[in-house]
Image (cartoon, rainbow, N blue to C red):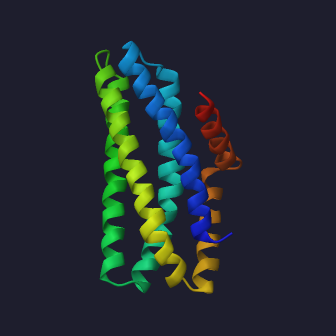
Amino acid sequence: MTPTERLKQEYKIILQVLAAAEREARTIQKTGKMDAGKIGAILDFLVNFADRCHRAKEKKYLFPKLRERCGPREAGIISVLLEEHAEGRHRIRMVERGLSRAAGIAEVRENLLACVALLREHIHKSENVLLPVAEILLTPDDRRALNIAFDKVEADLGDGVYQRYTRLAHKLAQG
């Protein structure tokens, strides 16, 4: 599997959790109540899988390699994607803040929805703009090196952690 195929596979997993986050935000909107355990699991996934694993692969390895190989247009999209990573982390912190406050239900709902919209758009840009360019620009040696680096990111999470978060995503997707 190529590095870009691996990232696309992870996007599918992340999208499952985004659907669960959106459902939870809609439930909050309808009922005025939140399931702190479910939201906590969503946040755990977004912090540890989406950020510490997936985004680490992009930020530490893919983006620098592409910057070596690309022109100004591609460098621009990389900058936009990095800004979106930062905005996503901010939204997650805002959901966490809302969870910690008794009157934070509206804050949780609003930031969950904003995070979902941001990350879906981010995934769309990455899949439809950046990754097709990466397929063209990356050499076979680049692909091998990136796969090794991606394996290291996953191993650094801990034994079985990547698989545990994949299972969590499936569980959250089922409701």
Question: Could you say where residue 9 lies in the image, as x and y percent from the top left?
Answer: 61, 57
Figure disc tally: 0
The image quarter containing residue 7 is bottom right
Above or below — where is 65 with respect to 36? Answer: below
132 and 88: which one is in front?
132
Question: Could you say where residue 54 lies in the image, as x and y percent from the top left?
Answer: 52, 56
Residue at 63% across / 37% down in the picture? 168
Residue at 40% across / 62% down in the picture? 125
Q: In the rendered view of the protein, which quadrant contains the N terminus?
A: bottom right
Question: Could you say where residue 66 lies in the image, as x and y percent from the top left?
Answer: 44, 78
132 and 68: which one is in front?
132
**In the image, is 129 to the left or to the right of 168?**
left
Above or below — where is 121 with respect to 95? Answer: below
Residue at 60% across / 70% down in the picture? 3
Question: Could you say where residue 42 lies in the image, as x and y percent from the top left?
Answer: 50, 34
Above or below — where is 55 with respect to 43? Answer: below
Residue at 61% across / 85% down in the picture? 141
Q: In the rendered view of the protein, which quadrant contains the C terminus?
A: top right
The image quarter containing residue 166 is top right
